[in-house]
Image (tube, rainbow, N blue to C red):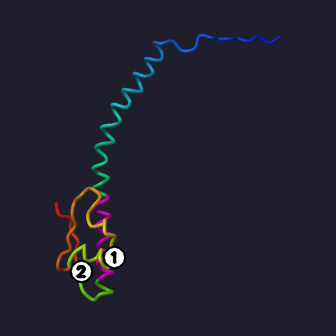
C-alpha cells in the first residue's frame, strides 16, 4: 500500500515577505550597475560609429575624388543616413581637412 502525504499548508506570509525582501535587495544592487554600464556602452558605440564614418569618408574620397566638407554633405549624397550625423550618446563628429573623423567633446 502506498501512503500519500498531503501538505495543504503552502507558504506562510513570513516566507513570502522574506522572498520579496531578497528580490528587492538584488534589484537595488543590480540597477545602479546597469545604469553605470550604459554610459560605457554608448561611448563604445560612438567609437564604432566613428570608424564606420571613416570608412564612408574613404568611399566618398574614392568615388568623388575629394574629401567631403561635412557629414551633412555625405548624408545628402547618400553615404550616411540623414539621422546618422552624430553618435548614439549625442556627441558630434567632424571631418578634418585630411579626411580624419574626430569626436567633438
Position in image of residue 82 (x %, y %): 31, 69
- Where are the magenta residues, as a range? 45-60
Residue 35 lies left or right of residue 13; in this view the side is: left
Residue at 47% x, 18% y is 16
Q: Is residue 58 above or below residue 31?
A: below
Q: Where is mark 1, residue-wise?
A: 79
Sequence-wise, the earlier of marks 1 and 2 is 2
Left or right for 79, reference 100:
right
Q: Secondary structure at mark 2?
A: loop
Classify 19 as above or below 89.
above
Instruction: Report the residue marked by disc 2.
Output: 68
103 in relation to 89, above or below: below
SS majority, magenta? helix
- Tell me how far mark 1 sits from mark 2, CA to CA: 10 Å
The residue depicted at 30 percent of the width and 82 percent of the height is 60
Most extreme residue toward the bottom is: 65
Within the image, what quadrant is residue 1 found in?
A: top right
> Which residue is at 31% across, 66% downward?
84
Q: Position of residue 61 (x, y in %)?
A: 28, 84
Magenta run includes residue 65 = no
Residue 21 position in % (x across, y down): 39, 21
Give 97 or 90, whichever is nearer the viewer: 90
Say whether marks 1 and 2 touch (CB < 8 Å). Answer: yes
How crowded pointer 1 is (Cα within 10 Å; few <14, some 14-19, many 20+) is rated as some
Amino acid at each position: 500500500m502506498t501512503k500519500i502525504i498531503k501538505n495543504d499548508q503552502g507558504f506562510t506570509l513570513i516566507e513570502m515577505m522574506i522572498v520579496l525582501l531578497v528580490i528587492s535587495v538584488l534589484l537595488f544592487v543590480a540597477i545602479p550597475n546597469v545604469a553605470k554600464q550604459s554610459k560605457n556602452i554608448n561611448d563604445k558605440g560612438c567609437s564604432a560609429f566613428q570608424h564606420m564614418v571613416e570608412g564612408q569618408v574613404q568611399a566618398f574620397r574614392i568615388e568623388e575624388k575629394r574629401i567631403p566638407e561635412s557629414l551633412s554633405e555625405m548624408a545628402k549624397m547618400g553615404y550616411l543616413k540623414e539621422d546618422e550625423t552624430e553618435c548614439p550618446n549625442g556627441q558630434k563628429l567632424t571631418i578634418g581637412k585630411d579626411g580624419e573623423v574626430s569626436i567633438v567633446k
